[in-house]
Amino acid sequence: MAAVLVYDGAASRSVHENSCSAALEEAGGPLLDRAVRSGQVRATVTVHDLVALAVGVPLATEGHSDPGERAR
């Protein structure tokens, strides 16, 4: 999962360099906007932040074969 979502060209930090990330930005942007308007998410959070989080979770757990260890 992380390999599909990871940004290409970290210098530009553009989600449009990766079609999967671009699709997530397009779909997630309106949802994030609604969450910000409702006060559920800080206005400083970006779609890029959320994609980075989505990439970080599988990267952090991919080296653990034990399900209990993955959960920590």
Image (cartoon, rainbow, N blue to C red):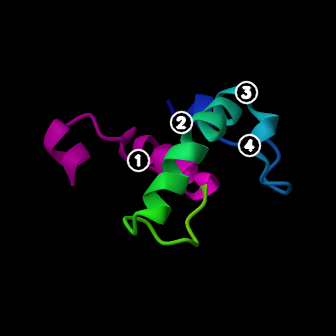
Of residue 15 and residue 43, the one placed in the foreground of this image is 43
Secondary structure beneath label 3: helix
Q: Residue shown at 39%/38% (left/top)? A: 62
- Residue tagged 4: 15
Residue occupied by mark 3: 19
| CA distance for labels 1 and 4 | 18 Å
Between 5 and 61, the residue placed more toward the observer is 5
The residue pinned by badge 2 equals: 2
Mark in front: 2 vs 4: 4
Depicted 50 relative to depicted 66: above or below: below
Amino acid under disc 1: Val
Q: Secondary structure at mark 4?
A: helix
- Calculate the distance from the C-alpha at mark 2 to the C-alpha at mark 3: 14 Å
Tag 3 near tag 1, CB within 8 Å: no
Q: Is residue 40 left or right of residue 10?
A: left
Q: Is residue 31 left or right of residue 38?
A: right
Name which residue lies at 20% across and 47% down: 71
